[in-house]
Amino acid sequence: MDAKTALEFVDGLIYDQTGKHLSNLERDVFMGSWQGQTYEEIYPNNPEYVEKYVGYKLWQKLSTVLGEKVTKKQFRGALERTFQRQTHSSVAVLSQEATRVEKMSEQAVKQIFVSHRSQEPDRCLATDLCEAIATAGHHILMVDTGIIPTTYGQSDRDWLTHIDACLARCDFFILLLSPQAAVSEMVLEELRRVKELQSKSHRYHPIILPIQVNCPPEMPLNHDLQNYLRYVHQWVWQSPMDSTAVIQAIVDVINGDGANGNATLQSSSLTGLIDRQELSLTTQSPVFHIHPLAVPSPSPTLPTPCPIADPELPQGQVRLDSQFYVERSPYEARCYREIVQPGTLIRIKAPRQMGKTSLMSRILHQAREQGYRTVPLSFQHADRAVFESLDQLLQWVCTRVARRLHLPHAVDQYWSDTYGSKDNCTAYFEDCLLSEIDQPMVLALDEVDRVFQYPKIADDFFGLLRAWYEEAGYGDSDSGLWEKLRLIVVHSTEVYIPLDVNQSPFNVGLPIELSEFSPEQVSDLARRHGLNWHSDQVAQLMQIVGGHPYLVRLALYHIAQGQLTLPQLIETAPTEAGIYGDHLRRHLWNLQHHPELAIAFQRVVTSHQSVELASILAFKLHSLGLVQLQGNEVTPRFQLYQHYFGDRFGHSEV
């Protein structure tokens, strides 16, 4: 048994008994102890605390679940004995559970959504998988996320409506996660909607079952995909030899047929693991060991761009070690200077996919180089329930920050009904976070636009950020603590909710508003891709997509790879078959879910001149990156959107 297998096995045992997974710090202690490290080597910042509180409680938990007393130096033997016992008895246990589930469900027919790309081996694997699921008596929707069928319904929107309806009623969402699917915007949108449906379902449905298809072990995932698949383990398909085992395992999970699943495991060399959170909602299923996709470690120093580098497919945040990050001089230098100032606040604003998170990650990197503690926190990844009250939102923030700092996070015990939510949160930061670290801390709040959607809590939350910023300048006894805190606030749109100007964080600190790439920057980026373009070619590309960082990089990648020429790109760009089809469909899907925005955008793309919209609609369309703001009026952001959406909205009702 290797260390990772042991850790996942222990985590599962403890979750089955307590309903809680191991904390990050407990996982660190376990892995370090498995490797023979001392507490000082595991956590040099505070080894005494880790030994007396974290380690002591961990060994107590292990002693309970393993049925015999263990210590830091003597636990591997007991763990391996328990692992062997459970392996030998799993057939009987899983058979009993399968019988129980069969009686409860009476062999209920399940609704299965299969998402895959229109390429091999994805298509062949999806076909075989669907045949097996249908043979087992379940209903299937087989979806190619790469293109909208031209024969479906009256329009593209009919197809997207059909996907919404199927997602809403499905029990399982099977995702064939190939390298191409991993960079698909439609796949991200599907997962986002599945997570939203789960948060509304008392059964936590649909359950996500991902299959890695020909994914290299070292392949990085973008930040959003990492978050959506966190705690969701995947099967691994590497060749047709794995098909039988993977398909049978998936069918067994859907059927709740644990006994057959165990037989499949015994006869196959394939290993994978299903998340225990999901198992608790369905049935005990065959346990597989997975090979998770890698998350690349940050480079110790930011690279200097090379004249030419191997093309790199853009997928969200630009990695720290990427040769294709384009500096927005002088913004980086200003941010790097500002972040070392006590109690500072940096505000970064730009529409979607303009490089906000990439800049934020570089500021955090510079802070770590100074020895600072850093905590990135994205509100896009918070469950809907977090925003139901100010108390829940602030407790979520406190818990997440404490976990990232590897500090105790007994927020429930610390929160007092005597004081208000903001007082409790401020005191928690003072007593449990800032006072427990010796270095400054940079708290980076990404996607704070999410809070704008909840005006009942937004005013208090943003007022609290402003109060913290001002605490550092008061010069009293607490100012030294608050000087440790440096804030980065990242958002996509203008602040369209009413905030008191004296309590808003959006009119203080260093404002950074990212703009599109200039022709010179696009030309430089083309050279890094090995393309010797003249100014006319740069202008042709920018006429279609402007200086949009993601769309420019996507075009240069495909051209540099020899997959198409610039004239071919110009011809196919606003079509389903073009390289932007995935990006455009995601926008179309979002607009379909917000009819008021769709109606407003229809006016924009079908007009031959600028259009005046209500401020809130203009700000939201701008945050999506669909329009340019010109005073009180808006125009389509660039030709790509004008042509694609003009064609779809020009002759139909929204």
Image (spheres, rainbow, N blue to C red):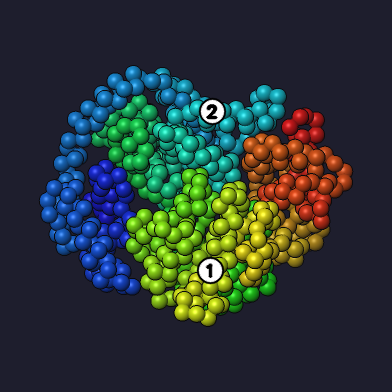
Q: Which residue is drawn at 58% across and 70% down?
A: 345
- Which mark, by number, is residue 410? none
Q: Which residue is disc 1 drawn over?
A: 468
For marks 2 and 1, the one nearer the N-term is 2
Q: Is mark 2 on a helix, strand or loop?
A: helix
The residue carrying pointer 1 sits among few (fewer than 14), some (14 to 19) or many (20 or more) residues within 10 Å by Cα, namely many
Could you say which is closer to the camera, residue 381 or residue 313? Answer: 381
For this orientation, the residue located farthest to the left is: 68
Q: Quadrant of residue 416?
A: bottom left
x%, y% of residue 111? Answer: 46, 25
Position of residue 381 relative to residue 161, above or below, is below
The residue carrying pointer 2 sits among few (fewer than 14), some (14 to 19) or many (20 or more) residues within 10 Å by Cα, namely some
Looking at the figure, which quarter contains the C terminus? top right
Q: Is residue 242 visible?
A: yes
x%, y% of residue 447? Answer: 58, 55
Q: Which residue is drawn at 40% across and 73% down?
A: 435
Could you say which is closer to the camera, residue 624 or residue 33? Answer: 624
Q: In which quarter of the image is residue 328?
A: bottom right
Q: In this view, does 350 lie to the left or right of 238?
A: right
Q: The residue under label 1 is which amino acid type?
A: Trp
Q: Can residue 35 be seen in this view?
A: no
Q: Which residue is drawn at 50% across and 69% down?
A: 442
Give the CA distance from mark 2 to mark 1. Answer: 46 Å
x%, y% of residue 250? Answer: 38, 32
- Which mark, by number, is residue 166? 2
For this orientation, the residue located farthest to the front is: 418
Q: What element carries label 1?
A: helix
Mark in front: 2 vs 1: 1
